[in-house]
Image (cartoon, rainbow, N blue to C red):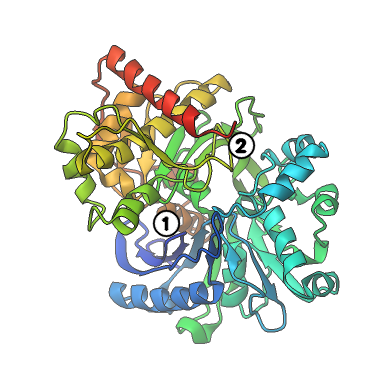
């Protein structure tokens, strides 16, 4: 295998499935994408068709290889990155899911979490997993599937079923059921892993009534775990890198030094601060998680999760019908000097960090007869910056030093207006890389590290390039006034 061999990434996200062929230098050689329909069976419930996901993965991989003019036999390895807590349970014999995948945004298990909280279980969960007891994570989703799908509990007890986050499900399908694995970053989001030992925790399994035989083997984020079936794409390509989307983005941003912070703007917004080899317990309702695991050694991070960022722009398009393309929002925001006091709090599926209020719901506050589409569009974009400020404030309160800059990526990061407003509200330089799809790039880096394309982390960091730096320029008094208005708006949607 030569050090300039291409790498193939499967990037399975909340709203789309993509395959990208990267050159060893990080350049994109071929891309294919398919939109993923969202299924809403009830208010606050979100599901995906896992069979559709697998079909889209196969189609996009073939299309991306064709677009790159690359044969499967030339590919050094496959990296997989995925929406994280989304939960699939499938039949081991057939590989067929027993139910639609329950998506990370889904809130149907809020009552289960509340019952466990009243029983005093949250301290155990926080201590072992670094997470809060919340429907966001996989454990209560698994429990719901086992109790609501007829016969599932008995079948799970007999070892007939398998659980996985999307990475695990895709590796199973790619290898024809030979490999039931997940990497440490995805395992850390299930609410079942002791993040200090890197092992499934028996006490948590009992708490959520989840049989051990349902769970995959936990592996490193970089390392060959198996090979895809040769009949799928024309060769048995090694599967060499696995990471949840936000950890992959952190790796793709080369945020390898403790204290470095990246923020990804996709469906939601996720900010991760590298804390090195020590897991830092948050006193401000952030999550302690595994950033990556290499050669059995874990690097940790503090994470703040915002459930709705780019999804709010999607709502302007698909829900309100006031725009046809997401890119229109930048021009609308520039049409007005400010929002006229309008704030959009996009709590469509509850509020994430640092509030963690699953019952909160979205609101537009401060409207007058003068409020129009430009003001609402601008308020939608501004909300992304305000929510990021909430996360950064919580990180700094937890002892993370103020970073020299915030590294940003994801679809919304290409919006210059949002990134400048972000720098202004944070009073912090914002760095946008030349490759904004760093989630996929991070998975490519992990696969390349496993296959010897890159020598070490320093070699990987040498491939990171900055596209643009946004410097703060807003007057402090204006910043304080805007943020004060946001704080008032958030308090209006919080559950009493």
Q: Earlier in the sequence, mark 2 or mark 1?
A: 2
In the rendered view, tell whether residue 85 sits above or below residue 269: below
Neighbourhood count class around disc 2 (C-alpha, 10 Å): few under 14, some 14–19, many 20 upward: many
Of the residues tagged 2 and 1, which is closer to the observer?
Answer: 2
Secondary-structure class at tag 1:
helix
- Which residue is at 35% across, 16% downward? 480
Q: Position of residue 95 (x, y in %)?
A: 65, 79
In the drawing, does residue 447 fall left or right of residue 474? right
In the rendered view, tell whether residue 336 sits above or below residue 232: above
Q: Report the front residue among 173 and 257.
A: 173
In the drawing, does residue 49 fall left or right of residue 149? left
- Which residue is at 52% across, 39% downward? 351
Q: Quadrant of the C terminus?
A: top right
Neighbourhood count class around disc 1 (C-alpha, 10 Å): few under 14, some 14–19, many 20 upward: many
The quarter holding residue 218 reads bottom right
- Which residue is at 16% across, 43% downward? 331
Residue beneath disc 2? 287
Is residue 128 in view from this perspective? yes
**Residue found farthest to the bottom:** 231
Spatial CA span between label 2 and label 1: 23 Å
Q: Position of residue 6 (x, y in %)?
A: 38, 66
Q: Position of residue 299 (x, y in %)?
A: 61, 40
Secondary-structure class at tag 2:
strand
**Residue found farthest to the left:** 335
Is residue 436 in view from this perspective? no
**Residue found farthest to the front:** 369
Q: Position of residue 265 (x, y in %)?
A: 39, 45
In the drawing, does residue 49 fall left or right of residue 308? right
Q: Report the front residue among 432 and 29.
A: 432
The quarter holding residue 220 reads bottom right
Q: Are marks 2 and 1 in contact (CB under 8 Å)?
A: no
Residue beneath disc 1? 440
């Amino acid at each position: 295998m030569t050090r300039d061999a291409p790498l193939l990434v499967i990037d399975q996200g909340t709203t789309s499935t993509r395959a990208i062929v990267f050159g060893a230098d990080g350049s994109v050689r071929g891309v294919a994408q398919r939109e993923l329909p969202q299924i809403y069976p009830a208010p606050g419930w979100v599901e995906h068709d896992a069979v559709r996901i697998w079909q889209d993965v196969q189609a996009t991989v073939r299309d991306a290889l064709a677009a790159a003019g690359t044969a499967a036999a030339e590919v050094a390895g496959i990296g997989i990155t995925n929406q994280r807590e989304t939960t699939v349970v499938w039949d081991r014999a057939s590989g067929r899911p027993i139910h639609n995948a329950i998506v990370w945004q889904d809130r149907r298990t809020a009552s289960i979490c509340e019952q466990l909280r009243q029983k005093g279980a949250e301290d155990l969960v926080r201590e072992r997993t670094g997470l809060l007891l919340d429907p966001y994570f996989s454990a209560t989703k698994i429990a719901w599937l086992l109790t609501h799908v007829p016969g599932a509990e008995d079948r799970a007890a007999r070892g007939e079923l398998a659980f996985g986050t999307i990475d695990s499900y895709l590796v199973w399908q790619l290898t024809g059921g030979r490999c039931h694995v997940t990497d440490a970053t995805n395992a850390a989001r299930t609410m079942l892993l002791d993040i200090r030992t890197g092992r499934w925790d028996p006490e948590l399994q009992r708490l959520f009534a989840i049989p051990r035989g349902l769970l995959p083997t936990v592996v490193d984020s970089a390392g060959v775990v198996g090979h895809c079936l040769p009949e799928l794409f024309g060769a048995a390509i090694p599967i060499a890198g696995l990471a949840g989307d936000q950890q992959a983005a952190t790796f793709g941003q080369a945020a390898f030094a403790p204290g470095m912070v990246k923020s990804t703007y996709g469906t939601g917004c996720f900010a991760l601060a590298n804390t090195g080899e020590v897991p830092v317990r948050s006193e401000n309702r952030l999550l302690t998680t595994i950033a990556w695991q290499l050669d059995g050694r874990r690097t940790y991070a503090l994470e703040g999760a915002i459930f709705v960022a780019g999804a709010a722009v999607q709502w302007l398009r698909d829900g309100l019908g006031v725009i046809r393309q997401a890119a229109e929002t930048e021009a609308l925001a520039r049409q007005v000097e400010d929002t006229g006091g309008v704030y959009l709090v996009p709590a469509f599926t509850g509020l994430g960090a640092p509030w963690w209020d699953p019952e909160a719901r979205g609101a537009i506050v401060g409207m007058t007869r003068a409020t129009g589409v430009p003001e609402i569009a601008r308020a939608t974009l501004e909300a992304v910056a305000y929510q990021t400020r909430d996360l950064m404030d919580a990180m700094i309160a937890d002892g993370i030093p103020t970073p020299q800059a915030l590294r940003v990526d994801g679809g919304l990061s290409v919006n210059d207006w949002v990134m400048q407003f972000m720098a202004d509200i944070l009073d912090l330089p914002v760095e946008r890389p030349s490759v904004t799809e760093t989630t996929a790039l991070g998975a490519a880096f992990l696969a390349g590290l496993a296959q010897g394309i890159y020598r070490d982390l320093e070699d990987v960091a040498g491939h990171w390039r900055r596209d643009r730096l946004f410097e703060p320029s807003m007057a402090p008094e204006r910043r304080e006034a805007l943020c004060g208005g946001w704080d008032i708006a958030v308090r209006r949607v919080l559950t009493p």
